[in-house]
Image: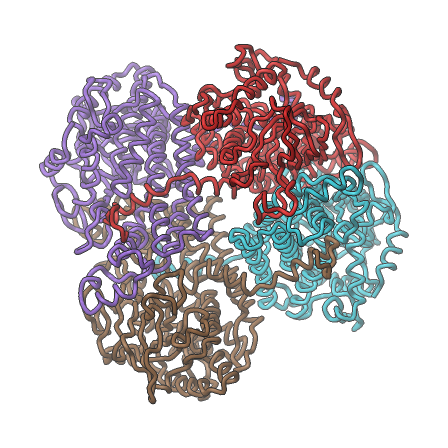
Chain colours: A brown, B cyan, C red, D purple
Amino acid sequence: MKTATEYRKKLSEMRPNIYVGGELLRRDDPRLEQPVNVVSTTFDAAQKPELKGLVTTVSHLSGQEINRFCNIHCSIDDLLNKQKMTRQLCHRVGGCIQRCMSADATNALSVVTYDIDQKYGTEYHKRFLKWLDHFQKEDMVANAAQTDAKGDRSKRPHEQVDPDLYLRVVEKKSDGIVVRGAKAHNTIAPYAQEIIVLPTRALTPEERDWAVAFSIPADAEGIYQIVRLASIRPRKYLKAPISNFGDAESLTVFDNVFVPWERVFMCGETDMGGQLALQFAEYHRHSYTGCKPSITDMVMGATALVAEYNGVENAQHIRQKLAHLIGIAELVNAAGIAAAHTAKKTPSGTYAPNGIFVNVGRRLAGENIFHEWEILCDVAGGWYATLPFEEDWFHEPTKKFLEKYTMRNPRISAENQHRLFRMISDLLASAWSGVELGGQYHGGGSPIMETIGLLRDYDLQPKKDMVKYLAGISLDDPHG
Amino acid sequence: MKTATEYRKKLSEMRPNIYVGGELLRRDDPRLEQPVNVVSTTFDAAQKPELKGLVTTVSHLSGQEINRFCNIHCSIDDLLNKQKMTRQLCHRVGGCIQRCMSADATNALSVVTYDIDQKYGTEYHKRFLKWLDHFQKEDMVANAAQTDAKGDRSKRPHEQVDPDLYLRVVEKKSDGIVVRGAKAHNTIAPYAQEIIVLPTRALTPEERDWAVAFSIPADAEGIYQIVRLASIRPRKYLKAPISNFGDAESLTVFDNVFVPWERVFMCGETDMGGQLALQFAEYHRHSYTGCKPSITDMVMGATALVAEYNGVENAQHIRQKLAHLIGIAELVNAAGIAAAHTAKKTPSGTYAPNGIFVNVGRRLAGENIFHEWEILCDVAGGWYATLPFEEDWFHEPTKKFLEKYTMRNPRISAENQHRLFRMISDLLASAWSGVELGGQYHGGGSPIMETIGLLRDYDLQPKKDMVKYLAGISLDDPHG
Amino acid sequence: MKTATEYRKKLSEMRPNIYVGGELLRRDDPRLEQPVNVVSTTFDAAQKPELKGLVTTVSHLSGQEINRFCNIHCSIDDLLNKQKMTRQLCHRVGGCIQRCMSADATNALSVVTYDIDQKYGTEYHKRFLKWLDHFQKEDMVANAAQTDAKGDRSKRPHEQVDPDLYLRVVEKKSDGIVVRGAKAHNTIAPYAQEIIVLPTRALTPEERDWAVAFSIPADAEGIYQIVRLASIRPRKYLKAPISNFGDAESLTVFDNVFVPWERVFMCGETDMGGQLALQFAEYHRHSYTGCKPSITDMVMGATALVAEYNGVENAQHIRQKLAHLIGIAELVNAAGIAAAHTAKKTPSGTYAPNGIFVNVGRRLAGENIFHEWEILCDVAGGWYATLPFEEDWFHEPTKKFLEKYTMRNPRISAENQHRLFRMISDLLASAWSGVELGGQYHGGGSPIMETIGLLRDYDLQPKKDMVKYLAGISLDDPHG
Amino acid sequence: MKTATEYRKKLSEMRPNIYVGGELLRRDDPRLEQPVNVVSTTFDAAQKPELKGLVTTVSHLSGQEINRFCNIHCSIDDLLNKQKMTRQLCHRVGGCIQRCMSADATNALSVVTYDIDQKYGTEYHKRFLKWLDHFQKEDMVANAAQTDAKGDRSKRPHEQVDPDLYLRVVEKKSDGIVVRGAKAHNTIAPYAQEIIVLPTRALTPEERDWAVAFSIPADAEGIYQIVRLASIRPRKYLKAPISNFGDAESLTVFDNVFVPWERVFMCGETDMGGQLALQFAEYHRHSYTGCKPSITDMVMGATALVAEYNGVENAQHIRQKLAHLIGIAELVNAAGIAAAHTAKKTPSGTYAPNGIFVNVGRRLAGENIFHEWEILCDVAGGWYATLPFEEDWFHEPTKKFLEKYTMRNPRISAENQHRLFRMISDLLASAWSGVELGGQYHGGGSPIMETIGLLRDYDLQPKKDMVKYLAGISLDDPHG
């Protein structure tokens, strides 16, 4: 396994192709420091003896110890441990740990490349395993790029005015393929080493050029990452872990990018595109059963703590809101556990979580995120929103007034009160906050996507038959 | 194991002490036929080869095959199988299967009698096992009587004007104890052979007389059961399984009832009363993770079927409501699975489900039951509420008009349309319906009880510490 | 104005055509006593001096004093008074006062017959006023029959296999028309003197036969009323106003019914059918802003009172639920007041309430009714659902036990406790309860109907223009 | 009336006492430009002939034309016009129009100073009217400073360790009083000419020093305003009205500020403190029935427009969300209209809106604001959250990629798509957004404050009596 220092060194050596606010950045630019800190946490955690077996595991390919984010799930316990690790690491960074993407993408590829080979006699799975072995040994960080630009939402890929609105193969060569298109909302991509590209939806037979999956270095020729940074107001005096972390998403443009065959994991098998898209989504929704409870934990902790600081921790309406937060966190958690315990072993040998449970879990999480913010807003009161800027707390004449007039529970020091409200202000009233809400709502699939998934996969027939039986309607009656 | 016929025969031999509407009934009175049918289903199911291992298991005491409702959970699988069996059997009776009560009470006694003995050197556990062995061999049906009359809700048991408002020991004799009081809401009690009595709440040291648990024949001298029957309008022509089932609850009065020592499982150990009450509640809430999804299945099936009959099954707003029902059913189910998989083996060897998961699961179920009724009402339209009585469908001149004017999807026969709307009318617009809503809301503990349970048991400190860490507030700071 | 006695006498003289449970009833049958009591209340109220001006008003036709239920709204105050009267009278009968239907139907006819005449040079309005004058002088009770059988919901009236599935004109004669069809969910019809028939939806030019409106005696030759009674369990000992009231709905079949021209108010003007349907709906939704708050008042009062009886009236979570009920009642009330104050005077001179406000008000009411039931269920606790039948409270040996064990707040007598829980049991756990929920949800238009109404009538363009302006998108830009 | 230019000139002449981020700002500092633009809008509007009578009115003191924000409500129409004006002006600035504060404070003072004088023979009302006459003629802008620092929330003002935690009189002199304390969350204060100080809660007889109300120039000696600016990311290229507006709130510190008697409107009348606090709150909540629908209008417009741009405007689940937004906007609007139409004329002659309606309206608004944000987030999709910064859209090589890959509905130009998503990004994912949510939730009183208000003012007794009547419980029964 690698260290965070080695990871950062590799980033610094990559070709600059990160565009932010009209500038071209190197990957060691200070503006990327906060999100890089998040990913570094996953390397640091793997070095901690107390997290051995949770954050690390043994590769089923090499038999060597690897970071669990590089692991293929070979058992129910692997799924459970990934969920548990995710919640725990998210606790340390105050949000999304980001690196789950590659785990979810590689597991989906493990399942589906095997199935394609079985059906078509191709060799994608062997290629994939070879690539994976290297990926594991180098302890690499990858983004999974799925969502296409999509253009006119009422049209299919091959019906768009501009065919590039879904990423596609524009040329096939003896040594590889050339692709063009763009993928949106790519968390972790600006500071990942690899980008794993997957299809975004089911495809029709006309859409062979769009049935493509591969992995490519994130700084390969022809890749442009146009990046939005989500930030909280920088701190000058009141340093705290929460202000060290952040995230960044890119619109990743593929402008005629060459991908050698050994990195191509699907090419033209239109009937398998939807399965790969879905398999990734289900792994990723299982990841949400780990990370989303962690966000709720943070909201819950902040709500409980600010209630104490405000001296209202025993008010019934506040305690009931805490119980509501507990309910959300642990129902989503339960959905992940149930999804793991009812996971199926796919023909490839890789375990896939139960799709129904990951969908009901992810949906509950998405449907509640705005309400969780509302609860913290409610219990904190308005002070987080009108909190004067940090500098005013460290300069006269305002310093003495702020310290005097913001005292509440007299047991709590002025600085700690300031620290807590500063953090809540960052959580609820920063640009980061709005992006976080968007990410928690849409990331991994908006609630409407899980609704669609459930309506597609859940078998309503036995439920209707149950009612027919009870009502005395014969199941065989052609008029029933 | 016994047969349904043997069960009914035993009921017929019991001393009549069932009071309904001013009359004293025998247990083979036709007015009890519907609920007795429900319980009979559990005997019939145990005879079916395809349900062997699910509805039956092997006693850890005798090594003989027993009905799972008599089983002590000796593994995680036992908990999972009980949950699964419950959902499946409820499907057949269109509601609560009722017999889970004894399973939940005996398991709680198994755990807590052992703990009492460890603490106080008593012999309750041995007594209990002996009683249980007989109970299993006779394949008995028991009610668990927990909720006391409670009197003035703002006062504790020993503070009530009338001390009998919580059931208590009024005399201790060499061969047993005499008890007085009443237990409310006793499902299954009017057609059970035994009543298992448990305390309803935590007790203070002054409340030794109220710290009592035992089992007693349901027709013992001094027991009066005052019973409310919940029924749907009887059918004359349109016979259907749904109209064969029902339930009945008693207010069970103990008017100086003698209980021999070999049937006494707690007597005076005030500090263990709360634990026993809670342990039963948590087993019972785990049962709800089986039965409640079954109720949702029925609502879901009826909603899907009536949408088809109305020809609106593809309307988006209806499909989203179905997805919402799926979400409730499977999140509650997931909570049960997670509770089983994280169950703990108690010192007695009996497995107890995770209390957090059963509470979040049961609470979600309770909070949604009225909304589920609303969804079915919404999709069915108002016809279930104004549906003419059954007789009008079978007599002229009204017969021909009803058949003519209630046609909707022309593929469905008039009789089947009638059957479905009759059943929905029973589900939504009968006295049974209102009682069912009350039972699904309050039974096993109202949502507010789970809220209280969660706020008592869930550890908020790590969540607050997480926030302190992120905000830069030292965990050791006395002013933080 | 007439008295309740006169009203009852007229009912007794009508031709029996009421079918209930396979029997043909006279209108003075005891089984119709409860709903007839409700309507009688509207006659009694008109006699009370303190309600003069509220329940009575002066006819704009005759200048004589009339019951407000027979009035045409000639001012904003008329609308406000109708709303106020409705809430007040519903208070006395514990539910729907029922007689608003004719007020809403006659007002709609007043507006639309005038408009038809203006457009087509017909004389419907004159006919209508003549009929109305008689109706007012005789102080008559009418049902408004709108909802057709509707058959296959995916097809229009003229596309149905059986054209009678929407009521239609089957023959035109010199002296009148002959109609055939059926109208569903006809509250008050079994004990009304007249039935006013209105179209149920917008019509296409092919649907001339279905564009028909008229009024006809409820016992006219060819009319069959098939009736569902919704009842609570009859009381033997514990008489109380709540048990004197009830309602009944009929499926009203028109089997070739002759309607003389002087009673026909629309015949063939397809383009006006939708307007008449809608105008009635909007008046009727305005009625709901009076009656629905009254239902909430009853739930609110029962919740507050049972909280007192249970001794938990100061618990925060209960008080917040009361506040929620207040919010529903007064927002619906506010919607009605705003609808009146922004009412428009139509060309006929009749005032019509603002459609947007009546729709948002009625929808809020519908969306909350199940939740209101849930609140009362929550605060009451489960005792209403397992409450032994009335007879057991008046016979030994059960009497003494019930009085002893149901004591709670010791200040409240056993009988009053019984009375309150008996009433709550009737409200929440009777066949009446389920029908009431259905009526409050669907009556006057289900929430989805108001949603459709709002999306049709509300002008979203100014809102989009506001956003374009703020975003700097020119309103004239063809690409914006 | 004054012009916006005159208003700005006066600001520029004020003593600098605005502290932002460690700096002392003049009031013409560019960092205050955005919020000053908002207030300027109220001056510009008063000059527009088409808004005459809506934004302007005639002073009941001088008979001269004045800006309606300076008006005392002398009729129901005044209340209705203020509500209407507020909604309309908020439309032009994309949020809170801010200047309502002074209208609400002066109206409350008008009512309560009169009542104090009646009770105590003081001359506050005369003083107030004299001050008001000048205020109206100078067309001044005022903040209403109500919320005290409050310190330990579990203690009353006189119980605090530091008595200044509620603003108080520290010295009474012959020519005036000296006050010390701080008021929080003061919208408009940094660019207002006056600050009107009101008590924040009911007071006990010991709290004479805290019973104080007055108006004072915002730059008076001893006043320090520590200000939080809420901003969206500044635009360089894509200028649009939305980016011209903003707001700013101050913590306003009174460090021994002298207030001459002619500006003091309450001093020591502890029993009237609560009434003044409440009267202001109710006027201010009535203002919310104007501004809050405007916010919903903006969310509704953006949702409808982005649905069009995304080509999904006909999807049912989106249309239902639009209907939900319509419901919120118009129910809050209806509450305001009903509050005006049932307003009472106070002894002072000033009209006060109905407290019940303003509370139910403001509460509904507060309870929905997070959900409204969620709806826009849902319908917009995630692109607003990962939208690259503005500069990247105007520089190569990213410009061409962004224009190519963000095309959706091909009818809409790339620039307009960019404009709309930029605005949505500002609305949902900026620091301004978080502050706006906080303001809409807590400003004018959080939902819990309205809940408390309703439970205090709403008469539950008639509702309980209604239930007693229906249940047959005598209203006179001492045991009922």
The reply, left or right, for residue B321 in relation to residue A479 is left
At which x and y percent is residue B252?
77, 45
Taking D345 as reference, is A300 above or below it? below
At which x and y percent is residue A405?
27, 43
The reply, left or right, for residue D124 in relation to residue A424 is left
In this view, the residue in front, C472 or A335, is C472
At which x and y percent is residue C268?
55, 33
In this view, the residue in front, D433 or D438, is D433
Query: Which corner quadrant holds the N terminus of chain B?
Result: bottom right
Quarter residue B384 falls in: top right
In this view, the residue in front, C192 or D204, is C192
User: Can the viewer see residue B172 in this picture?
Assistant: no
Q: Residue furthest right?
A: B13
User: Can the viewer see residue B297 in this picture?
Assistant: yes
The reply, left or right, for residue C250 in relation to residue B243 is left
Quarter residue D102 falls in: top left
The reply, left or right, for residue C427 in relation to residue B467 is right
In this view, the residue in front, C230 or B475, is C230
Query: Which corner quadrant holds the C terminus of chain B?
Result: bottom left
At which x and y percent is residue D22?
17, 51
What is the count of numbered marks?
0
**Which residue occupies 78% across, 59% down?**
B41
Q: Residue furthest front?
A: C174
